[in-house]
Image: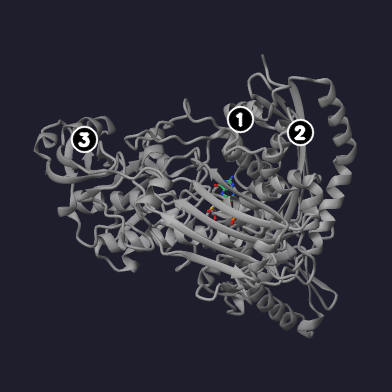
Amino acid sequence: MSVGRSVPHESAHEHVTGRALYTDDLASRFPNLLHAWPVCAPHAHALVTAIDIAPALEEPGVVHVLTKDDVPGEGDSGSTRHDEPLFPGEVMFHRQPVAWVLAETLQAAQRAARRVKVDYTPLPSILSIQQAIDENSFLTSPLRLADGDMSALDESPVRIDGELTIGGQEHFYLETQASIAWLDETGAMSVHSSTQHPTETQEIVARVLGLSANHVTVECLRMGGAFGGKEVQANAWAAIAALGAWKARRPVLVRLTRQLDMALTGKRHPFLARYSAGFSNDGHLQALRLALFSDGGWSLDLSEPIMWRALFHCDNAYHLPAIEAVGRVCRTHKTSQTAFRGFGGPQGMLVIEEILALAARRLGLAPDVVRERNFYCPGHTTHYGQKVDGAERLGLIWNRLKDTSDFEKRRQAIAGFNATHLHEKRGLAITPAKFGISFTATFFNQAGAVVLIYRDGSVQVNQGGTEMGQGLYTKIQQIAASSLGVPLDRVRVMSTRTDKVPNTSATAASAGTDLNGAAVADACAQIRSRLIEVAAGACGCDPSAVVFGENGVLAAGMSVAFHELCEMAYKCRVPLFAHGFYKTPEIHFDQASGRGRPFYYYAYGAAVSEVEVDGFTGAYRLLRTDILQDVGDSISPVVDRGQTEGGFIQGVGWLTLEELIWDDEGRLATGGASTYKLPSWSEVPDRFEVEFLSGATQPGTIGGSKAIGEPPLMLAISVREALRDAVAAFGDEERVTFDSPATPERVFFAVQRVRSERHALP
Ligand code: MTE
Ligand code: MOS
């Protein structure tokens, strides 16, 4: 059985030898290729009053400059609202492209772009959440979730009120945005795109060119990382490449450099949270009033469902007897913020963890005790009316992890360390995570697959999910091999193409395997039952007597190898291919009432982290992290481990290192790796233990497995909480907090604040 086995990533060998191809690597296959480069606006907000392309056309090697006059269809790449003009009359963020040069070389395109003459009338810009609130600049109306009796807030003996500012995050996928488009011999458009959502890229290319969808084919070989940043944000570049190819009748490559990618593409949403929470004296949360504001940037993008997910996850793992939560997306003159691993969930969860941590110190209780007291128990429902299935796993994970991480013993040891060290303090924290799995827009929760078996018994699998390094293809290969009873190397997973499986959903919401894996299994099951009929016919036995095993069947004492069976089926004129389909059952959600079951299930996990903070500098080290994650029955343990480690470290980056800074003119000041600090080997905990919950079969999912792509990111909250614990040890301040990310700088100033007069540095 391939499912459940630790196999290497299906492209591991290609990744490490450099043979794995990415969109941009295909450029050499197009001898006639043109390069596209944008003319970028020097203002965060301005009107474009005139564009003169004539000087640029004089530049040697320039073929054309694309402007709105070249668009045969609709010149907009906005995915939800059509609010992203490809050639804007009003510039909405600094460096927004207003025209695109097509040239024989990249250098020629870049030189010519500087010669396009654009006149602007600068306008005032909105550059912060607070400014957007003050100026009533929003992309959505308020989204609300409410439950219970809010009078409990005023009646609570303990009140925790405050505000938390949460920073965004740059995706920093290693492969920047890229697309190649060309016309085939029939005049139809073909596109290679580094996109998580080939179907949507197809739809938008078709819209821009005024073509029907069957005249556009989009293919994604694989992505060098996406993390949500290519869920909708790959579309604009594919649209420009396609428009260029349409106009010039030659293949066109759009590939953003790192700096351009950082300047032009959306990021994780910065958030501002305002909260009032009421607690009982023993630390039970009784009521929560919450206002969430996100910085959506210039266009709507996915900001609305991201805000919904933040609202859905402001409970994290805790029962909220009464809550009133309102979320609003601010419109600012910045890049359009977008999906990023966790999709708003992390921001919602960070707020409740902040509140519980502050409550614990106020009440003089250990934070883990307050957390545990508020856990969901079996039978509880969430603030949107969904029963918390599997809630017992929370306690299971919590207790087991405390045990295996030696939590209590280390807490004592740390107290001893802190008592004897004046200027270095250690901190320890355990935090849980509960993450809802499914797209909250119910209709996205569907998937298709086409499985082809050839007469020699070899298998090709086509399915709608994309590979971004997360191991989807590996799991798909394992699922198909197991379903058909063939060795892994008999199954080839084909690159994702819209002409193989139509109308697919984005590979996102961590549901890639749940959806596409189930569709593949469905197709395989159909073929398998046909093969069983064939075997029964050949052996003259009842189909129920046929045993479908590893590499073939056993029937009436005869064994037939899989490839022989396929040849027999062919001769009997039985089709050796099938299409599979899957839609997630039982889910629904009504936005107006804020009630339903948006998630098919929850993924649970917890982490314990220990840090050491240097009081002189605020620098810290992550000494140890222990993770226990519920992945159900893992389809691919090595892949799941990689996802858990990588997701956690990416979360550590978001919460402790990575800081986006926009200057007063709306320019991204942290526009490259030299100014934007990413986690690397040195930020990996000195000791890193990752385990999966055992005996955790999830009912109703493919192979009893659970999604893993996003949930571990939120375990990094344990690091922020460990930092709080360490900072608190520098003094006896009751309220210990800092904005996110907890950079060394912020930690230093937090230490300064908590050092009382007595402890203060001279
Ligand atoms: N892992 C790698 N290596 N690269 C990525 O881009 N994206 C993450 C996660 N893990 C990502 C990744 C995000 S945001 C999601 S939603 C899931 O993978 C998507 O894939 P899945 O649904 O197959 O888990
Ligand atoms: Mo992931 S943020 O759902 O692409």
Label 3, secondary structure: give it: helix
Which residue type carries mark 2?
Gly
Alpha-carbon neighbours of circle 2 within 10 Å: few (<14), some, or many (≥20)?
Answer: many
User: Tag 2 or tag 3, which sits nearer the N-term?
Assistant: 3
Q: Are marks 1 and 3 in contact (CB under 8 Å)?
A: no
Quadrant location of the C terminus in the rendered image: top right
Q: Which labelled disc corresponds to residue 680?
A: 1
The CA distance from mark 1 to mark 3 is 35 Å
Tag of residue 427:
2
Query: Which residue is the extreme one toward the top?
Result: 762
Query: Is residue 574 found left or right of 132 in the rendered image?
Result: right
Residue 503 quadrant: bottom left
Q: Quadrant of the rendered structure where residue 256 is?
A: top left
Residue 612 lies in quadrant = top right
744 in relation to 286, above or below: above
Sequence-first tag of 1 and 3: 3
Q: Could you tell me which secondary element the residue under label 1 belongs to? A: loop
Towards the viewer: 567 or 86: 86
Q: Which residue is mark 3?
A: 113
The residue depicted at 43 percent of the width and 58 percent of the height is 198
Crowding near the residue tagged with mark 3, few <14, some 14–19, many ≥20 C-alpha atoms within 10 Å = many
Element assignment for label 2 = strand
Q: Earlier in the sequence, mark 1 or mark 2?
A: 2
Residue 614 is situated, as x and y percent measured from the top left of the image, at 69, 22
Residue 480 seen = no
